[in-house]
Image (cartoon, grey):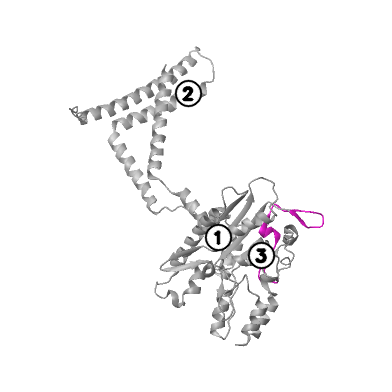
Amino acid sequence: MLPPPAPALPHSFIYNLIKNIFCLAMVCCFLCVFSARSGQDSSCHGKAVGQKAPLWLRAHFQALLFSLGCQIQRHCGKVLLLGLLLFGALAVGLRVASIETDIERLWVEVGSRVSHELRYTKEKLGEEAAYTSQMLIQTPKEEGENILSQEALLLHLRAAVAASRVQVSHYGKSWDLNKLCYKSGVPIIENGMIERMIEKLFPCVIVSPLDCFWEGAQLQGGSAYLPDRPNIQWTNLDPVQLMEELGQFTSLDGFREMLDKAQVGQAYMERPCLDPTDPECPESAPNKQRKQNPDISLELTGGCYGFSKKFMHWQEELILGGLVKNSQGTLQSAEALQTMFLLMSPRQLYEHFKDDYEIHDINWNEEKATAILEAWQRKFVELAQQSVPQNSSQNIHAFSTTTLNDIMKSFSDVSVIRVAGGYLLMVRTPVSHTIGLAMFSSL
């Protein structure tokens, strides 16, 4: 049989227990005051030596505190009620409290030059005019190891291609990098069919050391179709040849002139291949016929170029870290590789698709654009880090503005249980220490 349940404690017992605790505290305070006064009296009668001022201050302060404790003990109910009312009044402000997680507001000093420049940029270009950068950084596991090797760049290519193929499904639509990335500006052409084809082919702005090689074209996801030829992608796209073929259907003199001014040329088709044995490596690559691996340090010296050699020059400091050069300025080694994917801001994405027929049925707004960008950035970090094998000699680190904000918010979450436990510990510890010190001093 189960033992009978323990009887509930009567209210009188709980009241007497609280009263005894108060009395014990008062006795300890009295003993502490008595010890201070006896020390002062002993000093005055010549039975003790030392400074009189500290004893006098201690005796009077403890007498005041003892008097205050007596008053609180006589009116304990009123004091408790007043304390609860005061605590409740102060707690009302917690309803409107907000924790700041904006990096710009946390780190940029108010009134500094940086804050003035940021305010000027927002005033001239708008609050949401700037693009967002998603970074992919590769470092060797062994400190000091040279990362300028074919193996390291092929691994970087593998991670960057995996990151560029990220797709998310939101609101019944599929969103990939080609829809979300920042583009320098798609030209307007009178022929609607050719304009749509060029819009699909127009490359994203991706800052990468892979742009020094033909493999940089693999990061671009745009594609188009023309009759009697394979699917057009940047890996097989020669803009000069394409303009000649499209010129048979419409006048492209203005567009051809723009390509010439931007010094696009043959784009990636005339750049060396990281892996000349790759079957897709074009015949126009300078090292295709000889099957000779490129000189990585020499190719990366001076930086790389995007699809436009005039307007897209990626300096060495943007794509490499820990640079070491010889006396002639040629790269000897580096300790990090960096690729940056530029995405549109939520405002830009909203403006870009607000008149698109494909999204007319989802009540398109800026909040949905923000949700799509954040979902893509989270998946970008996840897939980029999963693309590298466990036994690799390199580390891949993926960063995005959304994951940084997620980290800030996770560390800023307030746990009610932890806060309440902390307050209880703060209250319990001083009381126990005070009683212990009082009993020790009375002895």
Q: Are the residues at dot 1 and dot 2 in contact (C-beta closer than 8 Å)?
A: no
> In the image, is 101 to the left or to the right of 316?
left
Q: Position of residue 189 (x, y in %)?
A: 58, 83
Q: CA distance from mark 1 to mark 2?
A: 77 Å
Above or below, comparing residue 322 to residue 435 in the picture: below
Q: Nearer the viewer, mark 1 or mark 2?
A: 1
Residue 308 appears anywhere in the view:
no
Q: Nearer the viewer, residue 215 or 344?
A: 215
Q: CA distance from mark 2 to mark 3?
A: 80 Å
Q: Are the residues at dot 3 and dot 1 in contact (C-beta closer than 8 Å)?
A: no
Above or below, comparing residue 97 to residue 365 in the picture: above
Question: Where are the magenta residues, as a range?
Answer: 305-332
> In the image, is 226 to the left or to the right of 423?
right
Q: Nearer the viewer, mark 3 or mark 1?
A: 1
Mark 1 vs 2, N-terminal side: 2
Element carrying mark 3 = helix
Q: Which residue is mark 3?
A: 211
Above or below, comparing residue 46 to residue 262 in the picture: above
Q: Nearer the viewer, residue 213 or 171?
A: 213
Amino acid bearing label 2: Trp
Q: Position of residue 37 (x, y in %)?
A: 43, 19
Give the residue at x 59% y 58%.
158
Q: Nearer the viewer, residue 118 or 350?
A: 350
Amino acid bearing label 3: Asp
Mark identifier at residue 56: 2
Amino acid bearing label 1: Ala
Q: Are the residues at dot 2 and dot 3 in contact (C-beta closer than 8 Å)?
A: no
Give the residue at x 65% y 77%.
239
